[in-house]
Amino acid sequence: MSDQIYFEDVRPGAELPTLRKDPTTQQLVMYAGASGDFYQIHYDQGFAQANGLPDVILHGALKNAFLGQLVTDWIGEMGTLKRLTVQYRGMDVPGAPVFCKGIVKKAAVQDGQGVVECDVWLENSEGRKTTPGSAVVSLPLRSR
């Protein structure tokens, strides 16, 4: 985790630090066990390919978790993740890196809190956004 970021440090257009993830089939099996999502498209290559997929694919909720990590790493221990939403628009496969990215859209003080709205997304190594979303966080104010 990096140093604490404060509301006064944030400006619209600022980019969140990119988070690279290198998912593996082992991670997918572990995630299936932890989440209870045992749909075979996430761990059985023959089943996935028989259903028209190029390979086993990452769980959508795992990609959501990757974006959650992007945001919570960025906001630090004193920040609060208020909302995270994503849409699953493309498939990602283990063995290929994915990149979690974000950009600040709005920042305002509301009810004594530094509220920041961000666009976030997961993209593949070709730069295609497979999991777009948004996040709302509150950041501490330096003046408090």
Image: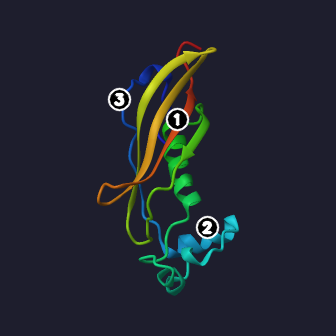
Residue 140 rendering spot, x and y as whole percentages: 57, 23
Q: Residue at x 50, y 55 (%)?
A: 88
Q: Are marks 1 and 2 in contact (CB under 8 Å)?
A: no
Q: Residue at x 60, y 37 (%)?
A: 83
Residue 99 rendering spot, x and y as whole percentages: 39, 54
Residue for badge 1: 75
- Earlier-in-chain disc, 3 versus 1: 3
In this view, which residue lies farthest toward the front? 52
Q: Residue at x 48, y 39 (%)?
A: 74
Mark 1 vs mark 2, CA separation in Å: 25 Å
Q: Nearer the viewer, mark 3 or mark 1?
A: 3
As shown in the figure, which amino acid type bears the numbered disc 1? Ile
Instruction: Choose between 21 and 132: the one closer to the eye.
Output: 132
Q: Residue at x 38, y 63 (%)?
A: 97
In this view, which residue lies farthest toward the bottom? 46
- Secondary structure found at label 1: helix
Q: Is residue 81 left or right of residue 128?
A: right
Instruction: Choose between 3 and 114: the one closer to the eye.
Output: 114
Q: Is residue 74 left or right of residue 15?
A: right
Residue for badge 2: 31
As shown in the figure, which amino acid type bears the numbered disc 3? Gly
- Secondary structure found at label 2: helix
Local packing at callout 2 (Cα closer than 10 Å; few below 14, some 14-19, many 20+) is: some
Instruction: Choose between 78 and 111: the one closer to the eye.
Output: 111
Residue for badge 3: 13
As shown in the figure, which amino acid type bears the numbered disc 2? Tyr
